[in-house]
Amino acid sequence: MPYEGVLQKMQTEIGSPIQYYLIFPNDYLNVNQVLDKEIHIRFIKYQCLNCGQDRPIYRQGFCRTCFFEIPNAGDWIMRPELSTAHLGKEDRDLEYEKKVQLQPHIVYLANSSNIKVGVTRRSQVPTRWIDQGAHEAIEIVEVPNRYLAGITEVALKEHIGDKTNWRRMLTNDVDDEDLEAWRNKLRRYIPKEAASYFIENNTETHMEFPVLRYPNKVKSLNLDKVPDFKGVLKGIKGQYLIFEDNTVFNVRGSEGYYVSLEIGG
């Protein structure tokens, strides 16, 4: 019997290796357990994660209308420095923005394809790092709101990258780095508003991904272009499924797509 439902990012559980789960309305799949098995993915329709309508997905699992209207798709999501809830100023829904923005946030270094700086809520550590496919990460500061994290990230990315090369991450073309040394090196660039929140004595967190074989090169599966796909699963890294034929499928990038999944032998 196939699994069927709208795709949302895989849920994860830290471990050696990390455990991955696809959640469906009446069931779930531990994706680690289907490594080396054939998976048949069939795209059925769209289902916006907000309105539930069968409308083409624009970004982040939302149709175009919802993306430009709902509070959880505001510009401050991708650009934390635009957060204004700490000033009592509304973007789309002040109560929602207070709930998300006015909680502890981490500015961190992660090494997925290269060292990058990023921001996440404290409650999303280490989930955020796993989703990015980082094999090592370290916190730099823990601040009380999203705005302070945002301005710290803006300052630090003048001196280190803030993007992941997803192709390098998926081929595991990654060098180990001394993130503690990098954290200490970047300390001087932290804005004065956040300087007192520097974390002095933490150590790197390491992630182990369930990958049997990394691809030599990658080709991305787009369900709009290839709505019916079969392949043998060889690994899971970040939010990607890695198949034997070098196809990779970005589950998070396909949120809002209603699919059926069948597991073969």
Image (cartoon, helix red, strand yellow):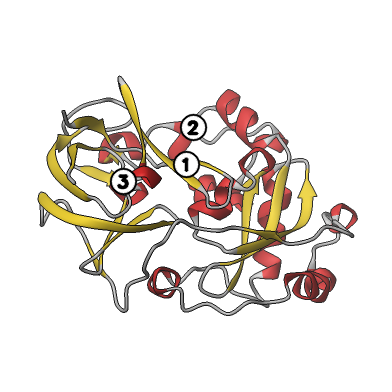
Q: Earlier in the sequence, mark 1 or mark 3?
A: 3
Q: Is residue 88 visible?
A: yes
Query: Badge 1, how many Cα within 10 Å: few under 14, some, many 20+?
Result: some
Q: Residue furthest front?
A: 265
Q: Specify whether 30 is left or right of 135.
A: left
Query: Badge 2, how many Cα within 10 Å: few under 14, some, many 20+?
Result: some
Question: Mark 1 near mark 2, Cβ–Cβ under 8 Å?
Answer: yes
Residue on which the image places disc 1: 74
Along the viewing direction, whichever of 234 and 152 lies nearer the viewer: 234
**Residue 127, position as x, y percentages in the image:** 57, 46
**Residue 182, position as x, y percentages in the image:** 75, 74
Q: Hey, what amino acid is under mark 1? A: Gly
**Disc number at residue 92?**
2
The label nearer to you, 2 versus 3, is 3
Q: The N terminus is located in which quarter?
A: top left
Q: Hey, what amino acid is under mark 2? A: Arg
Q: Residue furthest top?
A: 26
Q: Earlier in the sequence, mark 2 or mark 3?
A: 3
The label nearer to you, 1 versus 3, is 3
Q: Residue at x 82, y 55 (%)?
A: 194
The answer for how far apart the CA atoms under marks 2 and 3 are is 42 Å
The answer for how far apart the CA atoms under marks 1 and 3 are is 36 Å
Q: Is residue 79 visible?
A: no
Figure check: 203 above or below 217: above
Q: Secondary structure at mark 1?
A: loop
The label nearer to you, 1 versus 2, is 1
